[in-house]
Image: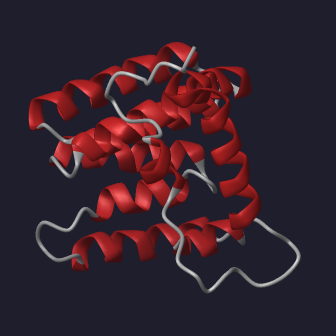
Amino acid sequence: GCDLLESHQKDQALRYLQRAVEKAAPGEPVLVLIGERLMEVDAPLAREYLQKAIDAGQMPGQAYLMLGILEERQGNSRGSKKHLAEAERIAHQTRDEALMERIETARILAAGPLAFMERLMNMGGPEAVEDFIDFMETEFDDEGPPSSTPREPFSSRAGAFSSAAPAKPAP
């Protein structure tokens, strides 16, 4: 469906997406999945599907998070903050730690590179920044195929973006 939208076949895409919704297994968060995918192709339609997901009770915390990200991309900081706050309320209510981490990450990334670097410094000082840079260089090395050696994700190694209190750098 999203590929059809990219090729400017909106009527056909909408029929395909509607069929996907109708054929989805009960409990499958198809509206959220479609809304997330549409964010890169058609922001107004993505907003519509994410709102449908909220109305249907399909992963409302994730849908609010995605709406917050979408609003930030559209330059609507106030709308973004409102949706992220609602996602956070739901995450606290449901004790969804993974959602809390995604919300924190979205807020940091929306705040820009300086806020991101400040967060890294607060988490572990210069070592955390070095770990992140090493991780990024390893993950996105253009000089060959990715390493076949599994690597622990940066977030696990440095506690990135956890809702826990940030580590204080050593004096």
Q: Is residue 51 visible?
A: no
Name the quadrant containing residue 48: top left
Q: 128 or 61, which is in the foreground? A: 128
Residue at horizontal 31 percent and vertical 28 percent from the top: 164
Residue at horizontal 52 percent and vertical 73 percent from the top: 1
Q: Is residue 69 visible?
A: yes
Name the quadrant containing residue 7: bottom right
Lateral position of residue 132 relative to residue 53, left or right: right
Residue at horizontal 59 percent and vertical 30 percent from the top: 120
User: Image height check: is 45 above or below 87?
Assistant: below
Q: 152 or 170, which is in the foreground? A: 170
User: Image height check: is 126 above or below 34?
Assistant: above
Name the quadrant containing residue 126: top right
For the view shown, which residue lies furthest in the right direction? 143
User: Image height check: is 129 above or below 165?
Assistant: below
Instruction: Point out residue 131 in the picture as x, y percentages from the top left corner.
Output: 64, 47
Instruction: Point out residue 31 in the picture as x, y percentages from the top left corner.
Output: 32, 58
Lateral position of residue 34 relative to residue 148, left or right: left
Instruction: Point out residue 72 in the picture as x, y percentages from the top left corner.
Output: 58, 28
Q: 67 or 85, which is in the foreground? A: 85
Instruction: Point out residue 132 in the picture as x, y percentages from the top left corner.
Output: 65, 46
Q: Pick the quarter of the image with the C terminus.
A: top right
Residue at horizontal 54 percent and vertical 21 percent from the top: 169
Q: 36 or 51, which is in the foreground? A: 36
